[in-house]
Image (cartoon, helix red, strand yellow):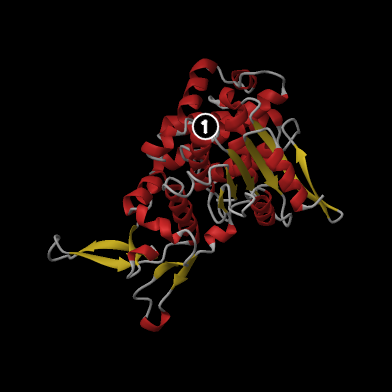
Amino acid sequence: MSHELIANELAGAKERITLIYAFNATGKTRLSVAYKDATKDEDGTHTGVYYNAYSEDLFIWDNDSENGEVNVQLDIRKSSLNRFHNSLSEDNIRDKLFRFRPDYRFEFIPYDNPEDGIRSVLFFDEVADPDDRNIISKIPRKISRGEERIFVWCFFLALFEVEGWADEQSSHFFIDDPVSSLDDHNIFITASTLFDLIEEHYEERKFIVTTHHIGFFSILSDWLAKGEKASKFKNKARFCTLTLKNGQISLENCRNDVFLYHLRLLQVLDQAYVAGEVKAYHFALLRQILENVASFLGVSQFGYVLNQIGIDDVDEIARIVNTLSHKKVYYFESDELNADSLETFEKIFTGLKEKYQFVLHTPAPEAASPTAAEAVVMA
């Protein structure tokens, strides 16, 4: 099957949401281009909007090496989207960035002709004069690759709300892998922003989401199929894998497959636990594992698993897990956990490993690290 045939199949699918896990070198970006061509109007105009590698490629660093990196900035290549930039404000972007808690400031540098939109973005740190705290200097800064990807994603999230673009090309959103170069925490937050976008718009437009990241796929599929709002997406979401076999690609449904997300999530948790770096968002991953084990055992509530691993106060521990795994915790509260929460995590996680004997093949740390609970006590 070709990318074009798969694009036509997706365009004609009845589901409002299609989530695709795409293995390496299967052509996710090519699929987004094929889908764009398959859904054009008769006059050749686009009917939907896209976020993919081409979107990210519009942003290029100008490192100003001739001037000692004095004016490092992120340039935005001119495209058909520039005419919508005037409707964007820096506050629009900051509103989207809030969940990621950036530690930098930024400002837009427009073209001389305002109709040409934004020429570049200057990132900087604000530093107070030691002799006069009222004097603030801007120190240009080149943000990391992961921070750049988050900024570009939030830029497009804000751009999706601009009148004249997404509201007119309103057939679909095609989102291709917004999580490249991100750590697990920011992958979780990015998944939550995309889930909110889906929840807001899925009734009036289709969503096609592709990713190579198994954790990102796992989180979104879990929220759509088993999360607290899953009932509204029943019969509206489809989960697939895009595979390449003998030179041919195929799109295969995987809703009922034993897709081993839980082993990857267990590795992530084990690495955080061994390093003493367990954060609030790890409880969301822990809950996914508990729910996956419960499903495998044929029960509907993960409280059964807690009982099986030797947890005495099952109802109270389940309540704690549910509270700490709620995504709003990560928007407004600290990522750090107190000693009691870390002790709860440790009790559940070690109980799972001892009971079910998962083989994780987690790389050993260079030096022995304290347990998560010990790390808090020593701090």
**In this view of the protein, can residue 103 be seen by the observer?**
no
The extreme front residue here reads: 43
Coordinates of residue 335 in the picture (x, y in percent): 41, 40
> 35 or 359, which is in the foreground?
35
Residue 262 is situated, as x and y percent measured from the top left of the image, at 66, 36
Q: Residue at x 59, y 51 (%)?
A: 177
Residue found at x 46% / y 30%: 324
Outermost residue to the bottom? 66
How far across and down, in percent of the image, does residue 17 sit? 62, 36
Corner quadrant of residue 270: top right
Q: Nearer the viewer, residue 257 or 85?
A: 85
Q: Which residue is mark 1?
A: 345
Farthest residue toward the right?
246
Q: Is residue 130 left or right of residue 223?
A: left
Q: Is residue 256 above or below residue 103?
A: above
* Label total for image: 1
363 and 176: which is toward the camera? 176
Q: Is residue 245 visible?
A: yes
Residue drawn at x 65%, y 38% as measured from the top left? 18
Image quarter (top left, top right, bottom left or bottom right) of the C terminus: top left
- Dot 1, how many residues are within 10 Å of its Cα: few (below 14), some (14-19), or many (20+)? many
The image shows residue 254, relative to residue 209, as above or below, that is above
Residue at the spot 55% in from the left edge and 31% down from the top edge: 203
Task: Please tell me whether mark 1 sits on a helix, a strand or a loop.
Answer: helix
Q: Is residue 5 left or right of residue 94?
A: right
Q: Position of residue 28 (x, y in %)?
A: 68, 53
- Mark 1 belongs to which amino acid? Phe
Q: In the picture, residue 66 is in which quadrant? A: bottom left
